[in-house]
Amino acid sequence: MAGFDDEGGSSAKRDRGARLLRVANVLKAHPEGIRAEDIAQRLGISRRTAYRDLVALQGELKMPTWSDEGRWGILDTAFLPPLKLTTSEAMAVVLAARLMVRYADKYDPDLASAFEKLAEGLPAPLSEHVDRSLDVLQRARRDPAFVDHVHSLVRAWSERRIVEIEYAAARYKGRAREARRATVRPFLIEPSTQTHALYLIGWDEGRAGLRTFKIERIRSVTVTPRRFEPPEPGTVETMLRQAWDIIADQPAVEVVLRFVPGVADRVAETIWHPTQRHERAADGSLVWRATVSGTIEVRLWVLSWGDEVEVLEPAGLRDDVRETHRRALARLS
């Protein structure tokens, strides 16, 4: 079609995922089916790009599309019912998604598609803010395997199907650990602001307990036909309440810290953890306490305060922080 290139013409500045969503929306609006050239005309792209996108919807994204005598369509089951949001509600979702954009270290086509939908019908200042967020997101690196794994896990989570994964665990005390296969009941997918990553939280059948899996370390995902019963309502959320960030499968431990007077107000004015308590000492310092799931995650937060914090309990965390500072000092000497 004259005037448009194969990469999308006037839509070239948009990411491919958002364009695929627009193609899917056109199909949804035409339950009787629509020809590829008509899709191209509506979206300002070439016929070849429209056809390529239709094939991608069917092959890559596994959307239930159909084709018959040159017409393409999509089954109603491909979309959830539309949300009717007020401007304030839509903005609340935009702000939540903005946090994902700020902390994401890779491109997320589903987030881009969500932004595209939110932008429709918003007042111009809000819509322009969404557009700028899309511009930032589309510059992030691509990781197709990660996106594919997320899609499979979301499907399994929503359908309550057990998954089989191959997982490469993190190095432990400087030593690499062999990848292992795990059979998991996916209870939750949760983002981490600390590691800028997504995590699968679920019941590991082989280890008979709740485990946390960083999705970036999952090498393969197979969604099985087997279904599982969900845990009692609130069970996972209660466990996550003790997590500092995302790890909820470690024994609970009380962490007691003393912050110097210079940062006491700053520490006291923020809710760092739902179980925290604190009290002022006579010298103006702040004694801060919380019960958290292990010390793996809270350790990084403690270290971020440098010499303005002292670990009082537990002894293991105190020793760990002291040794970390000692090694850092040795490298600077």
Image (cartoon, rainbow, N blue to C red):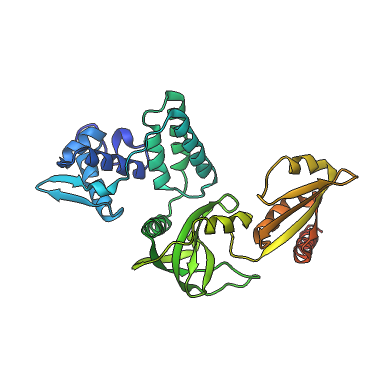
Image quarter where the C terminus lies is bottom right
At x 17%, y 38%, the residue is 37
Query: In the rendered view, does 26 fall on the left or right side of 297?
Result: left
Q: In the displayed orientation, state which residue is furthest to the front.
A: 232
Residue 130 in which image quadrant = top left
On screen, residue 48 versus residue 239, left or right, reads: left
Give the vertical position of 9 relative to 248 (above or below).
above
Of 56 and 49, the residue lying toward us: 56
Residue at the left extreme, as displayed: 69
**Quadrant (top left/top right/bottom left/bottom right) for the N terminus:** top left
Percent of width and height locating residue 63 = 27, 51
Q: Could you tell me residue 225's position as x and y percent? A: 32, 67
Which residue is painted at 40% across and 56% down in the image?
A: 154
Point 38% across, 57% down: residue: 148
Residue 246 in sight:
no
In the picture, measured across the screen, residue 4 lies left or right of residue 35, that is right
Query: Residue extending furthest right?
Result: 282
Picture layout, residue 199 above or below residue 54 = below
Asked if residue 84 can be seen in this view, the reply is yes
| Relative depth, front residue between 40 and 311 | 311
How far from the left and from the top, in percent, is residue 101? 50, 43
Query: Which residue is painted at 47% across and 36% down in the image?
Result: 94
Q: Residue furthest top?
A: 124
In this rendering, the count of numbered labels is 0
Could you say where residue 218 lies in the image, as x and y percent from the top left? 46, 64
